[in-house]
Image (cartoon, rainbow, N blue to C red):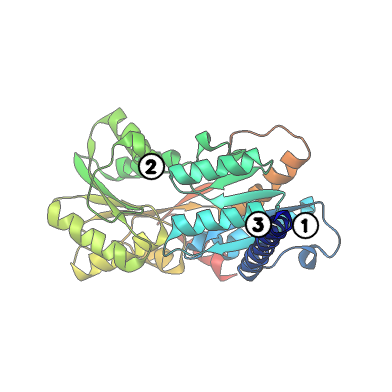
Amino acid sequence: MKRKIMFAIIGIALVVLMTAITIGLFVANRVAESTENSMDAVLGSPVDYHLMILVNDSDDAYKDSFLAGVVESSAEHRIAYEIVRVDSSNYEESLLDALDMAIYAGADGIALDAIQSARLTDKIMEASEAGIPVFTMNEDLPESGQISYIGTGRQTIGMLAASIFESIFTEEADVAVIEQSVSSSLVYRPAFEDELIAGIEEQLEAEGRISLSAVSYTERGILSAESAATELFSGYPDIDGIFCDNGKNTLGTIQFMLEKNLVNKLVLVGSGNEGEILEYIQKGGIIDASIVIDNHDVGYQVVRAFADYMEGKTLSDHISTNVEIIDKDNVEAFINESDQ
């Protein structure tokens, strides 16, 4: 009887071991299949550390310019990197899965395109407790145990947008925001829950001439932004201006403006330096200005921050990156630069 029990225990142990190995191989393969570029192929010689960078696969911010910054910084600081493009259709769940894979794979460090999520905050804390430093982009999650946030804070972006409205409107005005979120209903979220809105309200309240009347939250994509703009104007037809927080929301709102004949009737402050956005600024009457985060700088600083941390250097909780405002006065220079 004892022998049978012993064989049963051994059998169970073997099953558990084989299951763990199978899961490990599956996870490793998923990580490998979802990465692009990196490691010694880029650097041409052995590297010191390995950084995994998890980004949204539909976000243009993490394409050419960002990658160029990562490549430049990785070569300079001798860091191997892997960019994992995370499925945007269910971003929170996909990001949590990717973070699990990065932890299991034993990355020396992780950088990720963060969102406001209690589950993500807990998962980052789990990585930190496992000895893996985590750096965030897009959203600052100070309660998560992250090492640093890299980028221009959303509160700062909100203040910049509000200051543009203040420079354009000479009298009282009502403005609205079309902002990317996990929800797409026309709701007003309190400022303490949204750094972007907090920044806009802080700037506008100082002068008191312009009011923030509504915030419409979108899913990712141009069509979602058109729908959000339509919904927004059905509830607030007297809005004088709109701020869009990313390129897709900006382009979707432009399409709405063209369809509804709102050219020269609505002040639009957008985000991004996509070719279409620059052309619309150049034409005039459609988009008045666009806030552009330097994605090359973000990519460069993410790798640099990780390298500095691994060398034992003290880092700031918030590493600011470059941001610019494109308007009719400087758009020609941006167009010429993008053509080169």
On the image, the x and y values in percent for residue 282 come to 39, 64
Q: Residue furthest right?
A: 45
277 or 140, which lies in front?
140
Secondary element at tag 2? helix
Q: Quote the CA–CA distance across marks 2 and 1.
A: 34 Å
Q: Secondary structure at mark 3?
A: helix
- Badge 3 or badge 1: first in the primary sequence: 3
Q: Residue at point 56% right, 64% down?
A: 85
Alpha-carbon distance for marks 3 and 1? 10 Å
Residue found at x 24% / y 54%:
185
Percent from the top left, x then y, of residue 145?
58, 36
The label on residue 196 is 2
Kindly identify the residue that appears in the image at 47 percent across and 61 percent down: 273
Q: Is residue 95 at least partly visible in the picture? A: yes
**Residue 182 quadrant:** bottom left
Amino acid found under the numbered disc labelled 3: Gly
Q: Is residue 123 left or right of residue 224?
A: right
Asked if the residues shown at circle 2 and circle 1 are in contact, with their CB atoms under 8 angstroms apart, the answer is no
* Quadrant of the image occupied by residue 232: bottom left
Q: Are marks 3 and 1 in contact (CB under 8 Å)?
A: no
- Amino acid type of the residue that numbered disc 2 sits on in the rendered structure: Leu
Q: In this figure, which residue is indicated by the disc labeled 3?
A: 69
Residue 237 in view in this figure: no
Q: On the picture, is 11 further left or further right than 61? A: right
Q: Around disc 3, counting alpha carbons within 10 Å, would you say few (fewer than 14), some (14 to 19), or many (20 or more)?
A: many
Disc with the residue nearer the chain's start (2 vs 3) = 3
Going by the numbered disc 1, the residue's amino acid type is: Ala
- Closest to the observer, 281 or 185: 185
Q: Residue furthest top?
A: 206
Query: Residue 75, labelled with which disc?
Result: 1
Under circle 1, the secondary element is helix
Could you tell me how many numbered marks the image carries? 3
